[in-house]
Image (tube, helix red, strand yellow):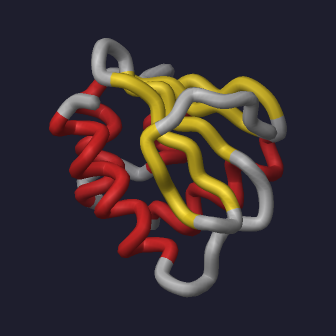
Amino acid sequence: MSDTVTEAVAVLNQKLGDAGFDGTAKFDIEGEGAIMMDGNGARAADEAADVTLSADADTFRSILDGDTNPTAAFMTGKLKVDGDMGMAMKLASVLA
């Protein structure tokens, strides 16, 4: 597991807090690995999900840091979404 994935799991769990996430989502970080999010929080894993978000490591880090809006990243093609768009919108509010 890469340092980027390890760091991202910690940040995502902090952002989720006690709220959890009512679905399954996968973040596919190019060249680094994958992160799963569900009702139990975030963890390093690569499993089937309701929605998969794909981006390079720099874009993903920028979204987590709050420097890039996830919707803007999607609209400019830096973030790809495959699956349930409603679930992707819920994720955008968690990441904001």
Residue 62 pos. (x, y %): 25, 45
Image vertical order of residue 38 relative to residue 31, above or below:
below
Figure quadrant of the N terminus: top left
The reply, left or right, for residue 15 in relation to residue 85 is left
Q: Nearer the viewer, residue 12 or 85?
A: 12
> Which residue is the extreme one toward the bottom?
18
Q: Nearer the viewer, residue 83 or 37?
A: 37
x 62%, y 66%: residue = 40
Image vertical order of residue 67 relative to residue 77, above or below:
below
The reply, left or right, for residue 75 in relation to residue 64 is right
> Which residue is the extreme one toward the left?
3
x 63%, y 74%: residue = 20
Q: Is residue 84 visible?
A: yes
Residue 56 pos. (x, y %): 33, 22
x 57%, y 32%: residue = 53
Q: Is residue 76 visible?
A: no
Image vertical order of residue 54 relative to residue 27, above or below:
above
Number of marks in the rendered image: 0
Figure quadrant of the C terminus: bottom left
x 77%, y 66%: residue = 22
Residue 54 pos. (x, y %): 51, 25
